[in-house]
Every structure is written in structure tokens, then in C-alpha cells.
Amino acid sequence: MISGLHHINLRAPAPMLATLRDFYRDVLGLEVGQRPDFGTPGYWLYAGGHPIVHLSEQRPGEAARGPVDPAAPTTFDHTAFAGSDAPAMAARLVELGVRFHESRSAVTGQHQFFLQDPAGNGVEINFPF
């Protein structure tokens, strides 16, 4: 039985991998931490002591992974993170020049930020209000 989401894994060529590492570390505030030696380059980024974002290198010449049916579009839209200080995160995003938009949902009781990482993946950050 599923009890929760363990992590996300983003796979990219080496230059983009470093850019993604920097984004998730410097913009979102995740911490680069220990990663087992899988025989391939990569990073694990931690929040609250848990490695929630895994980054792994797509080797030169390796086909990008996508839908099983090439005619079907991907269904991935975004990854949502739980945040704890909306004003501080907004200030950080503005300071770093990261474009985002905000929404407040009375239905869910959340103040939400929506943005994209450097690879174009959707990122949502949810804060309680």
C-alpha cells in the first residue's frame, strides 16, 4: 500500500543537472546531501532530513525518457512542495529574479506560488494561511 510520496527524480545532461542542482539548492533552499554511489553522476537534495529531489545524469547519446507512446503527450505538470514562510520565499524569488505567480485558495487553505525550474518543470510551493 502507498503511504506517501518518497521523492522525485529528474534526469538531465550534465550541464543541466548542475543548473537544476543550483536551482533547487539556491532558490528553493534544499540541501545537497549524501547520495549512494550508483556508478553514475547525480545529486540528492534534502528537506527536513529526507532526500526528496533526486537528480541523475542523462549520458551523452542516451535517449530522453518520455511517454511510452511517442504520439501521446506527457501528463506531468508539476511537483508541489510544502513551504513554511511565504513572505521570505517571495523575497528570495524576487531577489533571484525568478518569475512566479501567487494564488490563495480558500478551498484548500493554501497560499500557493507557481514557477518553473530551469528545465521547464512546473514547481508549486504551498504555504498554509
Image (spheres, helix red, strand yellow):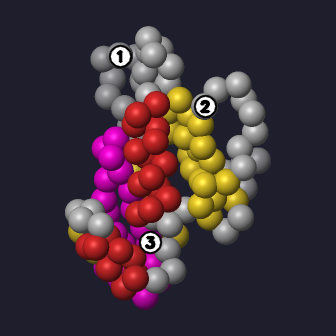
- 56 vs 91, left or right, is right
Q: Tell whether position 105 is magenta.
A: yes
Residue 86, given in percent of the width and then of the height, sits at 40, 81
Q: What is the secondary structure assignment of the residue under circle 2?
A: loop
- Using the numbered discs, state the Cα–Cα distance from disc 2 to disc 1 in whole angstroms: 27 Å
Type of amino acid at the residue the image marks with label 3: Asn
Give above or below for 74 relative to 105.
above
Residue with the mark numbered 3: 126
Q: Looking at the picture, tell me which residue is in the foreground, 25 or 64.
A: 25
- Earlier in the chain: of badge 1 and badge 3, it is 1
- Of marks 3 and 2, which one's residue comes earlier in the chain? 2
Amino acid at the residue labelled 2: Pro
Segment colored magenta: 104-129
Magenta segment, principal secondary structure? strand
Q: How many marks?
A: 3
Kindly report which numbered mark, 2 or 1, lies closer to the viewer in this rendering.
2
The image's mark for residue 70 is: 1
Q: Amino acid at mark 1?
A: Pro
Sequence order check, earlier mark of 2 and 1: 2
Tell which residue pokes out farthest to the bottom in this image: 129
Q: Nearer the viewer, mark 3 or mark 2?
A: 2
At a point 71% along the width and 64% down the height, the residue shown is: 49
Query: At numbered mark 3, what does the secondary structure look like: helix, strand or loop?
Result: strand
Residue 41, label in figure? 2
Lateral position of residue 21 relative to residue 97, left or right: right
Q: Are marks 2 and 1 in contact (CB under 8 Å)?
A: no
Structural crowding at the residue carrying mark 3, measured as other residues with C-alpha within 10 Å and reported as few (<14), some (14–19) or many (≥20):
many
59 inside magenta stretch = no
